[in-house]
Image (tube, rainbow, N blue to C red):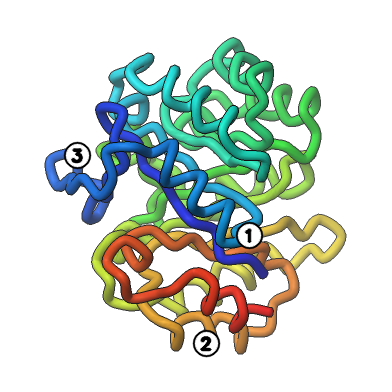
Amino acid sequence: MQIIPAIDLKDKKCVRLSKGKDESSIVYNEDPEKQAIYFQEIGCKKLHLIDLDAAFGRPNINFETIIKIRRSINIPIQLGGGIRSLALAKKYFEVGINNLIVGSMSVQKPKLVLQLAEQFSEKIYISLDILNDNIMIKGWDEDSGKKIQDVLDIYNDSRIKGYIITDIQNDGMLKGLNLEFVNNFLKKISLKKEFTKQVIIAGGLTNYSDLINLKNLNFDNIEGVISGKSFYEGTIDLEEAQKILN
C-alpha cells in the first residue's frame, strides 16, 4: 500500500479545497512543479494530480503546468479533472501521463470509457465521488443519478485499473477516514473475486491512526491512500506514513 501525495491545480497553483467546493480553495504552493519534485525526492512512488479548473468547466488553464510537472519528475502520475472526451484522454497519454482518472464521463458516457479502457488497458481509474451512496459529477456539483452499485456493474469486469473513491463529506476536513465507508465499498467489489480491482482511498486522511486502521481492514486490493490536506497542514509526514504502510 502506498501513500500518494496530491497536487490540486487551480490557476496554475497548488491548492486544497474543503468538501470539493470551488470557492473554498487555499493556496499552499505557488510552484506546483517544485512541489512535485519534492515528493519525488522524499521517495514517493506516485503523484495524484487533479486539474480543478478543468473539473469545474475551465479547461486549458493548467495544461502547460501539467506538462512541466510531467517533465520534471520520473515517478508515475495519475491525472484527473475534466477528462470528458477520448481526444483529451489520448492527448494526456501522448504527453506522458501514466494513468487517467475519469469521473463524470464514466457515468455519462460509459461506452466511451469502456472503449478507452480497452485501448489503454490497466491505465484508467474510475473516480467515484460519493455523497451518501450517490455518485456526484462535474466537480461534485451535480448528482449523476447513479448509485455505487450501478457503476460497479458497468466496470467490474472491464479492463480499467481500478477505482479511486472519495467520501465527499470527509474530503479536506481532517476528521479522519470514514472506515465504514471504505470497508463497505471494498466488500462490494470483492464479491466477484475474479474481477477484483485495485482501490485508492481519498478524502479524510488525517493522522497515522487512519493508516493503521486502514491496514487493519485487511484487504489486499487497497493500492494506496491519498494525502492532500494532511500533508499540507503538517498532520502527516509522508516518509513516516509510508513506513507505517510498509
Cβ atoms under marks 2 and 1 closer than 8 Å: no
Considering depth in this image, is 193 or 15 the residue closer to the camera?
15
Whether 156 is drawn above or below 226: the answer is above
Q: CA distance from mark 3 to mark 1?
A: 26 Å
Question: Left or right of 139: which side holds 217?
Answer: right
Q: Earlier in the sequence, mark 3 or mark 1?
A: 3
Viewport quadrant of the N terminus: bottom right
Cβ atoms under marks 3 and 1 closer than 8 Å: no
Whether 231 is drawn above or below 66: the answer is below
Amino acid type, mark 3: Asp
Which residue bears the numbered disc 1? 199
* Picture quadrant of residue 192: bottom right
Residue 65 in the image, given as x and y percentages of width and height: 42, 25
Considering depth in this image, is 57 or 150 the residue closer to the camera?
57
Identify the residue at horizontal 45%, vertical 44% (top origin).
146
Viewport quadrant of the C terminus: bottom right
Which residue bears the numbered disc 3? 22
Amino acid type, mark 2: Asn
Amino acid type, mark 1: Val
| Residue furthest left as drawn | 23
Which residue bears the numbered disc 2? 213
Q: CA distance from mark 2 to mark 1?
A: 16 Å
Is the residue marked by circle 3 packed among few (<14), some (14-19), or many (20+) residues within 10 Å?
A: some
Identify the residue at horizontal 54%, vertical 72% (top origin).
239
